[in-house]
Image (cartoon, rainbow, N blue to C red):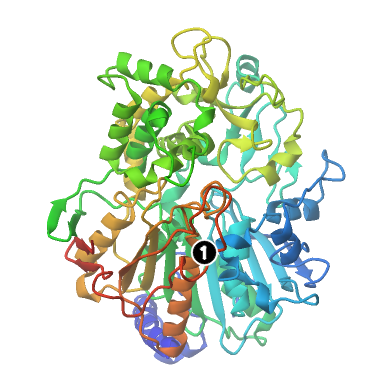
Amino acid sequence: MIWKTKLIKKWEVSVMTLIIKNIKTLTSLLFLPILAIPNIGYTDQNNPYNPKPQWITIHSSNYYDGDSDDLVTAGIGFTPLSSMIQKFKFADPDNPTTRELRQAKLNRFIDTKTGEGQLFGFRQQNLSPLFDGKIAGTEILATIKEGNVGVLLHIPVDFDKKKPCIVAIPASNYDGLYNAKDIQIRGLWGLKHNCAVVYNDKGLGNGIYDISSQQGFTIEGKIAKDNLLFNPKIKNRENFIKNYPNRYAVKQLHSKQNPEHNWGKYVLQSIEFALYEINDRFSATNTRNFTSYNTLILIYGAEDGASAALNAGELDKIGTINGIVAVNPQIQPNPEIASLTIQEGTSVRSFKYNSIPDYATTAALYIPCAIPAIEPNKADSYVPYASKYFYSQNRCDALKKANLLTKGTPKEALEKLHSYGWRPEMEIQLPYFYTEESIAFPYQYISSYGRFDVTENMCDYSVASTQQDPLYNFGEVMPLKEVKFSEIWSLSNGHLPVWANKDVTAIDLVANKDIDSPRREWFSSSEIKNQIDYGTKGAICLREKITEKRVNDGLKQVQATGNLNKIKTFIVHGQNNVKQLINHTSRPYVALNSGVEGKESQLRYIEVENASYLDGKSPFDNTLLAIDYYGEDAIEWLWANLTNNTTLPESQVIRTKPRGGSISQAPQATLENLVPIAQKPDSSNLIMIEDRKISLPK
């Protein structure tokens, strides 16, 4: 059994640690609470055998009956979520209730044609009028004091006390605790397996702060002036407000903590908090029945959350974690110890990978110019979102003037993107990607790594509320009007822009020195009045920032070692991911791991054709598939191995089949499209990994 193996490993470490601390007799080991995580302080409470961690603050605990409210859908239920887009309005927008805020965050349209609700996530065949996917249980909200990190624990009513398990989920992307996909896909998987599920926001969350009113958000999403997720100290506040009205600070950008370098620690602390709460509820007096020795502990993360999962694995030197699934990890291997050799067929090449600030600033520079050169998918007559780019040639001309292009054509810009790893089959995603992420994609990393203060206005950008009237909108800085600040917590997914609706932003990065007036970079003119070039000066400035010492120092703090301490791990990555580029993230990390751990590595690597960070909804329903199917498939394999000793699959490429048809007309996804992970893949699909070299099948 896995628990026995795990106990032996940890027992050895614990004995060594306690001997060093001059424990008088080995017998006393039998009666002490053995902690799996080093260097975390405890303070005695009512029960000295299960002391509450001194680094945690518990804010609330609520039981949901699985009818009027629940852990997964906030009382909405799967059928309404999958039937139509639910329109949600607060009874009092100026003072939404905690329940309304929670419902608004979990109100996500589930498009079952992607396969969700059929092949992964909820299973419609298991639902009925009496059970519509609502799961009863206890929800506990807390914060880790250092960094004010949000933690959310779900203990289902049918938690299995005989075979206890915990699934830790670091928040996806840059979001907070109530990320709907985290809860309704990854968290749901854990609850369906009778596990406790613990989320953490990685020190980011919806920490948006209104500088003028000195208000921000509490862990519950309420606006307040104290006990906030993020409450920056701003020097010369009045002077700043006078010069920059309607401005905001954002935790990831302006906390000056570079929280990413502590992501692994936060995950381990969230696990220890879950163990404390489970013991507090289910253990007999004067015992700590549930420990990391006898509790199955898994980590399941996506994107930034997947990176946090791998970071936790690298920190876990004593076997706390049983298994990890990382989907599309935003991971950055240390280039000083890593190298990558890719063999495709008989072709072998060494590959230079780049940091996220490097390739993200490249994207921000060249995508707006490259749009006219992108061809639509053969079944379609247009490229999604390309029609929004009226001023692409202005950006091309500005890049030529700055000697960043020679000819100043969209085709030349597209070739620049190809050289960084955006392959031709990825191109149709680029207009959507830039529209949704814009300059904020590189900005958030550079600002965080460089520990920039909000008052520095790095590259003459600041965060502001913008014009919300959709008619004649040019993104000028204006007070919030159509959307109240109290609603921002439910609208935000942790990064910029925060959209008021599908066409208009409520809060975004703005170019302070636009020639006309401060406005969104999307509408910004850098050189000529009223000639929009998407803020070329700012994009060039960010590109230059990546060479600054303060930014590189922060980047070095987050770079991965590749040592997963022999933890059973799946990395799942979509080959067409335009956001976490596979040649700069997963491939070099897997290669590094093979060099560091060698034949002792327990890492399985899955590449999925026709998959990105997007979930296969329109306008990419006919070209992309839901990567979350493969995350769930991987964790099912891990579960089977750890509970029934099933042999794990080998590393492989999954040959998928797009759903086809035209945009918004793709048929239902089936197992012909979402081909499952094979335990024994054909040799034509097998990925070979050895000594920093990845051999990919043609």
Tell me which corner region of the image, top left, top right, bottom left or bottom right, holds residue 587. bottom left
Tell me which corner region of the image, top left, top right, bottom left or bottom right, holds residue 427. top left
In the displayed structure, 341 sits above or below 524; it is below
Going 57% across and 63% down the picture, which residue do you hit? Answer: 668
Q: Is residue 54 visible?
A: no
Count of marks overlaid on the render: 1
Q: Is residue 252 visible?
A: yes
The quadrant of the picture occupied by the C terminus is bottom left
The image shows residue 471 at horizontal and vertical percentages of 70, 22
The image shows residue 22 at horizontal and vertical percentages of 38, 78
- Taking depth in this image into account, of 409 and 349 the one nearest to the observer is 409
The image shows residue 212 at horizontal and vertical percentages of 69, 26
Mark 1 — residue? 269
Describe residue 589's horizontal placement relative to residue 57 as left or right. left
Describe residue 536's horizontal placement relative to residue 418 as left or right. right
Binning the other alpha carbons within 10 Å of mark 1 as few (below 14), some (14 to 19) or many (20 upward) gives many
- For numbered disc 1, what is the local secondary structure? helix
Q: What residue type is labelled 1?
A: Gln
Tell me which corner region of the image, top left, top right, bottom left or bottom right, holds residue 449. top left
Going 59% across and 61% down the picture, which residue do you hit? Answer: 113
